[in-house]
Amino acid sequence: VEGAWHMAGFQAGPGLGRRPGKASGAARIDHLDVGMRERLLDVLHIRDRAAIEASGKMTGCAPDLAEIDRMLVALCADGLGAAQRALELAVAYASERRQFGQRIGSFQAIGHLCADMLQQVELGRAGLHYALWTQDAGDPREAHRTAVMCKAYAAETYPHIGASAIQVFGGAGFTWEYDIQLFYKRLLSTQLTWGGSEVWLEELAALVIDGEAPPITVE
């Protein structure tokens, strides 16, 4: 999580973080519509909420919407790395561990788990790559929509990847003897940090229903 903060350009400080000055033209939280501002403040658990709401006070403390989006995308990038490593460890173990005279990776149930994990990782990678691109080159509305979608997917799917990897290892996966338990914990933290999937799916629904999300076109 700390790495995600640095990728988003934050330094440790009160609330979410303190950045010097105020970016020109930035859509800050205190300038957003009431519904959006309340949702983001609730999700991110900003402790100095009263200071942020007070106009003209501590204006350098409230992050703008673009900064929040970058934080979400950075967190998802961290989660994707953990999910990828969990998959690699599971496949390596399934290729080495033998039971009933053959590698457990040859069993259909284990093979299906690994195939499902691969599909989930690659879907997350595709979504993350697009979200990263929109942070640099996309419409600000599209950048926010993709960041929200990315976090919703990560919170919903990445813990399942960790759980499937643990299942490949069997009971041994929960022990300190194998590193897979570390990545499972990391994926659970990705799920819980800054709200679970239901929070961000609700935000996505609000964007679509309120007409704040740009239309999706296929060329």
Image (cartoon, rainbow, N blue to C red):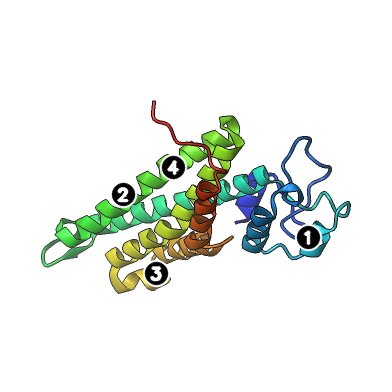
Along the viewing direction, whichever of 184 and 145 lies nearer the viewer: 145
Q: Position of residue 116 (x, y in %)?
A: 28, 54
Distance in Å between CA atoms under marks 2 and 4: 14 Å
View extreme (right): residue? 56
Q: Left or right: where does residue 63 sit relative to residue 4?
A: right
Say which residue label 2 marks: 118
Say which residue label 1 marks: 14
Tell me the amino acid under the disc marked 2: Leu
Q: Is residue 3 above or below residue 186?
A: above
Q: Secondary structure at mark 3?
A: loop
Residue at point 42% right, 59% down?
156
Distance in Å between CA atoms under marks 2 and 3: 24 Å
Does the residue at mark 2 contact the one at mark 1 (Cβ under 8 Å)? no
* Disc on the earlier residue, 1 or 4: 1
View extreme (left): residue? 101
Q: Secondary structure at mark 1?
A: loop
* Disc on the earlier residue, 3 or 4: 4
Count every numbered label the image shows and give the total: 4
Tell me the amino acid under the disc marked 1: Pro
Say which residue label 4 marks: 127
Q: Secondary structure at mark 4?
A: helix
Along the viewing direction, whichever of 162 and 91 lies nearer the viewer: 162
Q: Left or right: where does residue 189 sit relative to residue 31?
A: left
Say which residue label 3 marks: 177
